[in-house]
Amino acid sequence: MLKPLSPPLVTHMYTADPSAHVFEGRLYFYPSHDIDAGIPFDDLGSHFGMEDYHVFSVEGDEVIDHGLALHIKDVPWAEKQMWAPDAAHKDGKYYFFFPAKAKDGLFRIGVAVGDRPEGPFKAQPEAIPGSYSIDPAVFEDEDGAYYMYFGGLWGGQLQHYRNNAYSPDYLEPEAHENALGPRVAKMSDDLLSFAEEVREIKILDENGNELKAGDHDRRFFEAAWVHKYKGKYYFSYSTGNTHYLCYAIADSPYGPFTYRGRILNPVIGWTTHHSIVEHEGKWYLFYHDSTLSEGVTHLRCVKKAEITYDENGDIQTLNPYLE
Ligand code: FUB
């Protein structure tokens, strides 16, 4: 019998894709709100039919549900599938970033603004110009610049983009070709748009070569996150169909990032998706599995576990279940 490393943080609803931040000295997390929308399973994740977001905060063992922060009916451009969100704070305002499918069937990334970390947030009338695919993660650097990282394969549609242009004829590269990279763009001062053209990030192996598309144990799939530790940029992500959370390190927010290892071994359920945050001198991994629903792929639960670094700055791999 496997014993989970951590219990679910939320049990009165299904939650996933947690993006954790410390705002006003308090630890918040911004998850997807999983529901059973009654949509049949497919490889494009159509069964992830989420419609709204709640914001949560944690203090010790207490987790507070701050209630509805944004609903799809209040987002003029969005039609369905509110997937993994993130949040940022700047100049007294809170910004909530989220992907959703627009009426043309393509994912875009939107932003909604509020006065409090927990919302409510008011959505901008249009998605961020030039945005596409899924899983936005907004990183605030020490110099005050903000960068959005994003992208996800398969249902996240990243395979249909080259040089920021969409075509249904673009597909995943062949196994021997370079893997598709996650995307990054610096944000404008008001955090409502990109300040530059979206760039593709390279993830390199230990010899300085780009990871190949066939390297499913290491190549980027979805769930981008960036944090900084001892002056280095840590880009962490999910390998999707091989179910690892991995990380790579760089000297610049644009990369190139060099692959370093695994953060979390596979969980119960198809996906996991995470964030990493420092709070009161400790580092935490927020992630999800499907234990609360006893294994239902799209009914997930957010969890939290402490991570540690060794003297080289390498993150020690966690096993999500104990023997
Ligand atoms: O929650 C829907 C999708 O599942 C997310 O956008 C992906 O990262 C995966 O967790």
Image (spheres, rainbow, N blue to C red):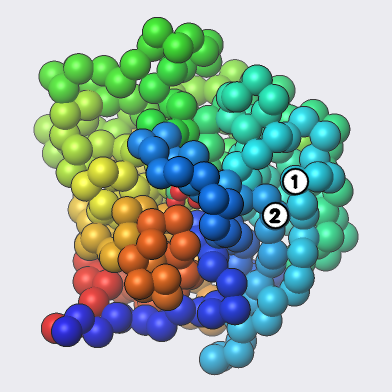
Classify the position of the C terminus by image quarter: bottom left
Q: Tag 1's secondary structure?
A: helix
Asked whether disc 1 touches disc 2, contact meaning CB atoms under 8 Å apart, the reply is: yes
The residue at the point 22 percent across, 26 percent down is: 213
Q: Position of residue 161 (x, y in %)?
A: 46, 17
Q: Amino acid at mark 2?
A: Asp
Residue placed most toward the observer, 147 or 264: 264
Q: Amino acid at mark 1?
A: Ile
Relative to 61, say whether 257 is above or below. Answer: above
Q: Is residue 100 left or right of residue 225?
A: right
Q: Position of residue 46 (x, y in %)?
A: 49, 39
Instruction: Answer yes or no: is residue 208 visible.
Output: no
Q: Which mark is residue 72?
A: 1
Relative to 124, say whether 141 is above or below. Answer: below
Label 2 belongs to which residue? 52
The residue at the point 54 percent across, 91 percent down is: 61
Mark 1 is surrounded, within 10 Å at the Cα level, by few (under 14), some (14 to 19) or many (20 or more) other residues, namely some
